Amino acid sequence: MLAQAHNSYSITDDSLTGELRRAVRDLAAEHGFTTEGIGKAEIIVSELASNLVKHAISGREILINLLDDGGINALEMISLDSGPGIADTRKMLQDGVSTAGTLGGGLGAIRRLSDEFEIHSRIGRGTAILSRVLAKRTG
């Protein structure tokens, strides 16, 4: 995969969600994503930011970049934190499971909307979530 450096966004509170959505929308639209793909990416980045604000104690960051993998553009969003970690990531991916008293659909929605998804978490160390949304073939 060829890519430039990721754009980094420090997530201090919910007010940055609009900025993130615009950054994702503009980058995706510039590189041939469909309206559906742009919408998916906007929801994903909003959920990632919301989760950081609700659950992470420190080190809350989202990285965004456009990748070209053999002629297929991919919008990559990576959420990183130095929070408490998630003991059971499989359980937290189930709809209706929440530790914050919410509806508990965020992580599951991120996974469903992503073309590629990974989550890694260690108790006491933090969590990393990778989401990629693919565009159309460019070549």
Image: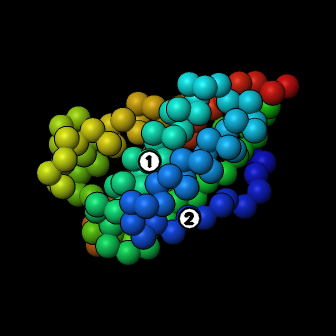
Q: Residue 9 carries which label?
A: 2
Q: Residue at x 65, y 61 (%)?
A: 7
List x then y, in percent, for residue 84.
27, 69
Describe residue 108's horizontal placement relative to residue 97 as left or right.
Answer: right
Quarter holding residue 107:
top left
Determine which residue is flagged by label 1: 46
* Residue 122 in view (yes/no): no
Describe residue 35's horizontal placement relative to residue 17 as left or right.
Answer: right
Q: Which residue is drawn at 18% across and 37% down?
A: 96
Query: Where is 94 relative to 87, above or below?
Result: above
Amino acid type, mark 1:
Ser
Amino acid type, mark 2:
Tyr
Assign a secondary structure to mark 2. strand
Q: Residue at x 27, y 38 (%)?
A: 105
Q: Do the residues labelled 2 and 1 touch (CB within 8 Å)?
A: no
Viewer-proximal residue, 51 or 115? Answer: 51
Q: Residue at x 46, y 42 (%)?
A: 44
Assign a secondary structure to mark 1. helix
Work out which residue is located at the far right of the displayed protein and give it: 139
List x then y, in percent, for residue 41.
54, 38
Viewer-proximal residue, 19 or 104? Answer: 19
The residue carrying pointer 1 sits among few (fewer than 14), some (14 to 19) or many (20 or more) residues within 10 Å by Cα, namely many
